[in-house]
Image (cartoon, rainbow, N blue to C red):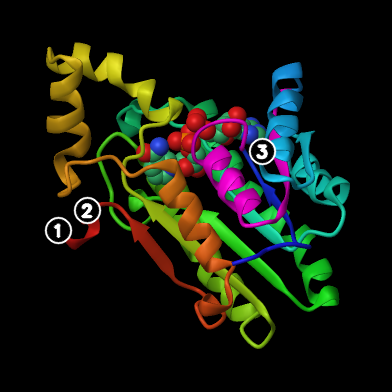
Amino acid sequence: MTLKGKTAVITGSNSGIGLGVAEELAKAGADVVLNSYTDSDEDRALAERISTDHGVRCRYIAADMADPDQCRGLIEQAGPVDILVNNAGIQHVAPVDEFPREKWDAIIAIMLSSAFHTTAAVLPGMRARGWGRIVNIASAHGLTASPYKSAYVAAKHGLVGLTKTVALETAEEPITVNAVCPGYVLTPLVEKQIPATMEKYGMDREQVIREVMLARQPSKQFATVDQIGGTAVFLCSAAADQITGTTISVDGGWTAL
Ligand code: NAD
């Protein structure tokens, strides 16, 4: 399939799932805009590498998804955007009554409000050009809960709700809006949780992975960033023209339990 001539913006894409999605969209021929809040030579080198590897235009635009003006500014700076992937995310784990207020605010801002701002900014252009795809990277935690992840679970459930609402508002137009719900994917975000979990349960790394992280993932395997990217590419294909307002789980059976 070819996405040649389309431009995709992927928020939070200098690492992990966002980078995997950017690679797969580029492989399918799309020009891509990478983003994070950092502004480093490594970020620009990454964009150059993707451009060379896949023969597409790839730019890096620094913008902090915690800041509404920067969310909207990213879309403005990117120029005409055909595909928007809302992916930027962080995690913090604590009981709700001890959950730091600033962490709650940051998680909701980066993972939920940012998608509202980028979506609002991108829709007029998609309508004017008569085609658009919005892919929100939610989570199995957009459909189920786990203790100690109140902000994350609330943000992801909120993102699924936003997905459905915007899908209804665009239902008669050639624009689709869907959420991909990954189970555990071994990315830096997940890697960072391993040492604390090892300490908490007195387990080694392999035990943490199998008995804690993948306890609810019946396949007992992590999903991969290219599988999430491939799902995003599918949602941008003609086969997915009538798929809107829904969630696609890539979770090894987690939500079937
Ligand atoms: P990651 O830490 O590798 O990537 C997160 C990305 O978001 C990075 O590029 C980071 O720079 C960016 N980011 C963070 N704060 C930002 C900000 N303020 N502004 C702009 N960019 C910002 O983590 P990941 O696992 O690849 O997570 C990506 C998305 O996938 C998140 O929304 C996460 O919730 C979701 N997800 C991850 C998993 C998993 O198991 N890894 C499972 C389900 C959903």
Q: Position of residue 132 (x, y in %)?
A: 70, 70
Q: Position of residue 97 (x, y in %)?
A: 33, 30
Q: In the figure, is residue 80 to the left or right of 42?
A: right
Query: In what element is the residue under mark 2?
Result: helix
* Mark 3 vs mark 1, CA separation in Å: 40 Å
Q: In the figure, is residue 188 to the left or right of 73?
A: left
Q: Which of the two discs, 3 and 2, labels the residue nearer the N terminus?
A: 3
Query: In what element is the residue under mark 1?
Result: loop
* Mark 3 vs mark 2, CA separation in Å: 34 Å
Residue hosting label 3? 53
Tag 2 near tag 1, CB within 8 Å: yes
In the displayed structure, would residue 220 be above or below residue 49? below
Q: Residue at x 55, y 47 (%)?
A: 21
Q: Position of residue 176 (x, y in %)?
A: 60, 73
At label 3, counting other C-alpha atoms closer than 10 Å, the crowd grade (few under 14, some 14-19, many 20 or more) is: few
**Displayed quadrant of residue 49:** top right
Residue hosting label 1? 257
Tag 3 near tag 2, CB within 8 Å: no
At label 2, counting other C-alpha atoms closer than 10 Å, the crowd grade (few under 14, some 14-19, many 20 or more) is: many
Residue hosting label 2? 254
Q: Is mark 1 within 8 Å of ligand 1?
A: no
Q: Which residues are magenta?
A: 13-38
Q: Which of the two discs, 3 and 1, labels the residue nearer the N terminus?
A: 3
Q: In the figure, is residue 23 to the left or right of 185?
A: right
Q: Nearer the viewer, residue 57 or 118?
A: 57
Look at label 3 and name its amino acid.
Asp
